[in-house]
Image (cartoon, rainbow, N blue to C red):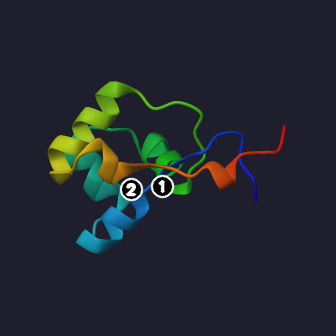
């Protein structure tokens, strides 16, 4: 299904690889459960830099490990 933007969040894969649940990540980062859910399901239109910083620091990842540009996801103009 095409999206309105071409950015995919890879948080779901990173959490699965570490065996982390949403509550685990919430406790580790302080990020709200709704925000974690939206990122994992790619149901977002913007990502707060504070959230990205917390995720990168906590999971020892770079932004490029969490966000991926996929132009084929874009809706046709």
* Residue shown at 28% from the left, 53% from the top: 25
In this view, the residue in front, 6 or 39, is 6
In the picture, the quarter occupied by the C terminus is: top right
Q: Position of residue 69 (x, y in %)?
A: 51, 47
Q: Position of residue 44 (x, y in %)?
A: 57, 39
- Image position of 39 with respect to 12: above or below: above
Q: Quadrant of residue 52?
A: top left
Q: Position of residue 40 (x, y in %)?
A: 48, 55
* Residue shown at 26% from the left, 57% from the top: 24
Q: Position of residue 75 (x, y in %)?
A: 78, 45
Please identify the residue farthest to the top as the structure is shown.
49
Q: Is residue 32 left or right of residue 50?
A: right
- Image position of 18 with respect to 35: above or below: below
Q: Which residue is mark 2?
A: 11
Helix, strand or loop under label 1? helix
Helix, strand or loop under label 2? helix
Q: Which residue is mark 1?
A: 40
- Image position of 63 with respect to 12: above or below: above
- Check if mark 1's residue and mark 2's residue have beta carbons within 8 Å: yes
Q: Is residue 49 left or right of residue 37?
A: left
In the picture, the quarter occupied by the N terminus is: bottom right
**Number of numbered discs on residues:** 2
Determine the CA span between mark 1 and mark 2.
5 Å
Q: Quadrant of residue 54?
A: top left
Could you tell which of marks 1 and 2 lies nearer the N-terminus? Answer: 2
Callout 1 crowding tier (Cα within 10 Å): few <14, some 14–19, many ≥20:
some
Q: Is residue 57 left or right of residue 3?
A: left
């Amino acid at each position: 299904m095409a999206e309105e933007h071409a950015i995919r969040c890879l948080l779901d894969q990173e959490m699965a690889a570490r065996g982390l649940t949403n509550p685990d990540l919430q406790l580790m980062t302080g990020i709200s459960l709704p925000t974690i859910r939206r990122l994992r399901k790619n149901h977002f239109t913007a990502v707060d830099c504070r959230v990205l910083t917390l995720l990168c620091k906590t999971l020892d990842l770079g932004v490029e490990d969490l966000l991926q540009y996929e132009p084929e996801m874009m809706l046709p103009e």
